[in-house]
Every structure is written in structure tokens, then in C-alpha cells.
Image (cartoon, rainbow, N blue to C red):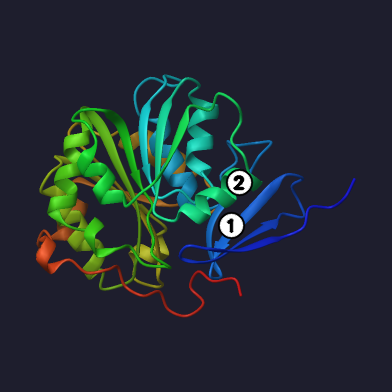
Amino acid sequence: MSEPIPVTRAVDHGTAKLMPDVDRERAWLLTVDGAPQSYVDLDEPTHLEFEYARRLGHVLDTVGEPGRPLDAVHLGGGALTLPRYLAATRPGSRQHVVEFDRGLLDLVAEQLPLPAGAGVTLHAADARAWLAAAPDDSADVLVCDVFGGSRVPAHLTSVGYAHEAARVLRPDGVYLANLADAAPFAFLRSQLATLGARFAELALIAEPGVLRGRRFGNAVLAAAHRPLDIAALSRATAADAFPARVEHGTALRDFTRGARPVRDEDAVMSPEPPEGAFGIG
């Protein structure tokens, strides 16, 4: 059999590259302009290679009863890693994926097709505009993993955006975001304050080294109107190859103290990662 070869293509907002994993027969890494975006194993969709993706998966595992189908919205498509994960772990789920880059969607659909009956609908659209048109109380979970290059777009960081997310989620729904920052965490703290203006419960999942300000890195923010299963999340994240800590309650309020919710007119992109923080050359 012929060996899989990398695929490089100019998409709407950069240059995308699909690179095969030499250690896993049908696994691929997607990069855009050199920045890793997604990793998927077509034969084992429950394998989440990136640490932040595993943390998002741990939260998804706690939503409702295990195995129950979910209505999910994913803002940011990449290689559809989490939609594939939910389709495998919760068959029958109905999922919408909103990706601004139509060329990237076309590349992934062509080279890494979803399995038949996956229940995933793809939309080439701006995330906030699509969300504004979505029905009230229509989703059990909303995952935001949107990066313009290596930065979260400003219009997905404000109270106006958080209001739309809360409106679309059902009362027992869960909001999830993949964010990135470093000490003194001005962006991350502002996002906690912003989501805290709309949701009663918050949790933050990150590696201890990131939380201690030793380096720039990803942090997963979870928000809900109901208590989150902190014990289950703590067990799952502590068992990962690179263990993470779950901050919540008083400790998280102390971390956020002094930060203010972000208005649309004041919104800014997330900070530029230091050179080499995420790129692979």
C-alpha cells in the first residue's frame, strides 16, 4: 500500500497543511500557516491527541447521562476533532459546526471525510453572526475554539457574545471555550468576568505551569447555569499524561477579582503568542 503524503492547500485565510502521523495509520495533523489546529485519527475518533482537546472532551463527558445524544454547536471547525469524538461517544447527537473558512471546510470534507450518519452539519459562516440567528434553547453544549491565526477574534470575547451563547444554550447546557494567555492573565481574567456576567457556574482547566505564570498556554473555560461536576473533571484531568488543575469557586473568584466584563466597544483579540509557543515550523 502507498504511504499517505502531506497535502498543502491555500484556503481562504492562510495555507493549510495536512500531515500524516507516522505512528498511527490514518491519523492526521492539520496546521494553518504553521500553527497546529487539529489532530484526528479517522480509525479512532475518541483519541484526542492535543491536551486542550482532551480537557474539552472531559467536560463533554460530564454533560448529561453518559452516552446520551447531545445537540451541540461547535464554533470553529478545524479538522472536526470534537464533532467526531461526540459522534463516536454519543451516537445520535445532532451537531452544527460553524467555520469561517469555507476553503478549510472543503479541504477537510474532501481529505478527512466524516463517517456516514455522523449527524454533523457544516456551515461556512462567521461564528457570532451564525449564533445570533440560532434559535433560543437549542443546544446542550456550545464549544468555542475559534482562532484567527493564533488569536481569538475580538467579537467573540464580549458580553454581547456571551449573551448570545447563553440564549442558545438550554438551561442545563454547558459553554466551553479554548483560550490562551500568560501571566498576568489580563485576557483570561477578562473572559472569566465576561462569562461570569451571564453564567452562575465557572471552571477553569489548565496545566499548573500555565496557572503559575511560568509559560504561555491553553486554558479551557467551562460555564453553566448549574453546578459542574468538578470532582469528575478533577479526576479525569489529573490522570492525563500532562495533568491539569481545575480551578473553581473561591479560588477562581480570587483569580478573577478586579477584572471587568468586556463590552463590544472595548473588545480586543487574545494576546499574540510568543514566537514558537504553538508553531511547529
Q: Is residue 186 above or below residue 253?
A: below
Identified by mark 2, the residue type is: Val
225 left or right of 14?
left
184 left or right of 93?
left
Local crowd size for mark 1, using a 10 Å CA cut-off: few (<14), some (14–19), many (≥20): many
Instruction: Please provide percent x and percent y for residue 138.
Output: 25, 28
198 left or right of 7?
left
Identified by mark 1, the residue type is: Leu
Tag count in the figure? 2
| Image point (61%, 30%), residue name | 115
Instruction: Please provide percent x and percent y for residue 150.
Output: 42, 68
| Secondary structure beneath label 2 | strand
Q: Is residue 280 visible to us here?
A: yes
Q: Is residue 260 above or below residue 253?
A: below
Q: In which quadrant will I find the N terminus?
A: top right
Instruction: Please provide percent x and percent y for residue 190.
Output: 18, 62
Instruction: Tell me, yes or no, whether the two marked residues, 2 and 1, touch with CB atoms within 8 Å.
Output: yes
271 left or right of 236?
left
Instruction: Please provide percent x and percent y for residue 214.
Output: 39, 73
Residue tagged by mark 1? 30
Check residue 40 in the rendering and tell me which mark sits there, or answer none: 2
